[in-house]
Image (cartoon, rainbow, N blue to C red):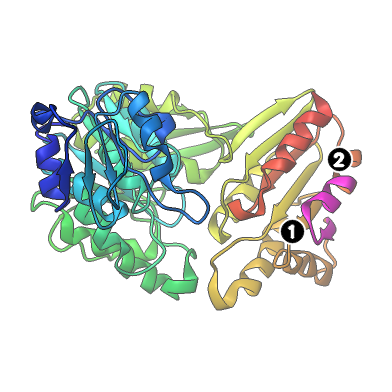
Amino acid sequence: MKNMTLSRVAQVVEGKLILPEGSEALKDKEIMGAVNDNRKVEKDFLFIPMVGARVDGHDFIEDAFSKGALASLAEHELEKCSGPYIIVKDTKIALKQIATAYRMELTIPVVGVIGSVGKTSTKEMITSVLSTKFNVLKTEGNFNNEIGLPLTICRIKAEHQVAVVEMGISDFGEMHRLGDIAKPDMVVMTNIGQCHLEFLKDRDGILKAKTEVFEHMPEGGTVILNGDDDKLAGADTLGLKKVFYGLNGQEISATDVAADGISATKAVISINSEKIDVTIPLPGNHNVANALAAAAVGNELGLSKEDIKKGLESAGTIAGRNNVITVRGITIIDDCYNANPVSMKASIEVLGRAAGRTIAVLGDMGELGVDEKNLHYEIGQALEDNHIGYVFTAGELSEEINKSLNQKNSSCMAHHYSDVDSMLSDLLPIVRSGDTILVKASHFMQFGKVVEALKARFE
């Protein structure tokens, strides 16, 4: 990490550097990275122990040194320590201070991906496109909060040419803090949906919170907006350059969108009137929109249309996000990492395109605020519109989906359960070859066990 010597780190975090006797020269040695997990320590890394509800990271400092750590942070003096350490008041705050200082040393473009739905899929697609020309550092998994983002910034090395970072929030002020760390040169905003309503109240609140990032962008920065989203179409970007993408005639647009089975989508993408025929290896119109965002980023960073096409057609799936799994004649759409009304309806639309019997296995969606029951109830209409054959729901809120279908006298065969295990005991026996099963819920519902149970039943 350029210019991040131990003495510089101590200055940045306003801490006290403690050096073992005879190791004065180490204060001028640069750290090569920073992690809060001792299992991920590499040579000359800085270990950042954090105190959690059940685990105190300070207990793993010596293990970090045994794996090659150059130094550690600590929130108190250590009785015995085999290497240098810096005493700070709060290691979480210190991590943000380190990442903020390091970001100021970087000259590579940083692309921030923001939105209510599709951030991770869009980040992956942008990375796939940019990787045709650049060495790209991307957010791993869902490291998009006030711990994950600074850890991602600290992973940027000299060989990286672009960084693509996901930025997720649930309340006002968080994006200010994330923006101050990442200072993105370019921001992609996927949509303003019904997420985190518990704190942000409504879509106007969500827009206000997410657009806090604009105050932390450089004067020549670019904002890439989903022009099909009514809130983003008129968003005030504080004078920053705007580029619009979308399915409805934006600067970067798509026509002739058609499903290619349930695992891919064909489209003709138009970039400044130049057209590209692509087959995106992901299902659904929402993934075409994600592809357009990636094409817009690639175009802004000077990629050729051929490179953009190659990148889009090489995009992969991620476990838990529209990941299509085929096991002995059954098809599982594993989309159980997270859920909100927009993504739930999009996934149901994908399921509705499948041949053979269709089964939706759905669970509760979290953080929807005072209207949470009605937002679950509305999912019933999407199931009916897409002619889903069987619906299995589990969870307190998901009972509203079941009520909706029953009150509509729907042709969907609907079953509700209080817990996942009870649901599985009825679900597994009815699944047969040729079925397509969507598994979708918020992460806290732990619907990954449904996917694993289905795979085990047929493997």
Residue at point 8% right, 30% down?
A: 28
Few, some or many C-alpha atoms within 10 Å of disc 1 (few <14, some 14-19, many ≥20)? some
Residue at screen point 82% across, 56% down: 412
Which quadrant of the view contains residue 430?
Answer: top right
Q: Quadrant of the C terminus?
A: top right
- Which of discs 1 and 2 lies nearer the camera? The answer is 2
Name the mark on residue 428.
2
Identify the magenta region. 413-425
Residue 14 among those drawn in magenta: no
Q: In this image, 165 relative to 266: left or right?
A: left
Query: Would you say residue 416 sits in the magenta stretch?
Result: yes
User: Which element type, helix, strand or loop, lies under badge 2?
Assistant: helix
Confirm whether residue 159 shows in the render. Answer: yes
Name above or below for residue 366 compared with residue 39: below
Q: Residue at x 44, y 23 (%)?
A: 314
Question: Residue 231 vs residue 239: left or right?
Answer: right
Mark 1 / mark 2, whichever is N-terminal? 1
**What amino acid does circle 2 point to?**
Leu
Question: Viewed as shown, does residue 41 lie left or right of 214?
Answer: right
Position of 447 relative to 34 (above/below): below
Label 1 to label 2: alpha-carbon separation: 23 Å
Q: Residue furthest bottom?
A: 370
Q: Position of residue 47 (x, y in %)?
A: 31, 37
Q: Are marks 1 and 2 in contact (CB under 8 Å)?
A: no
Q: Which residue is mark 1?
A: 384
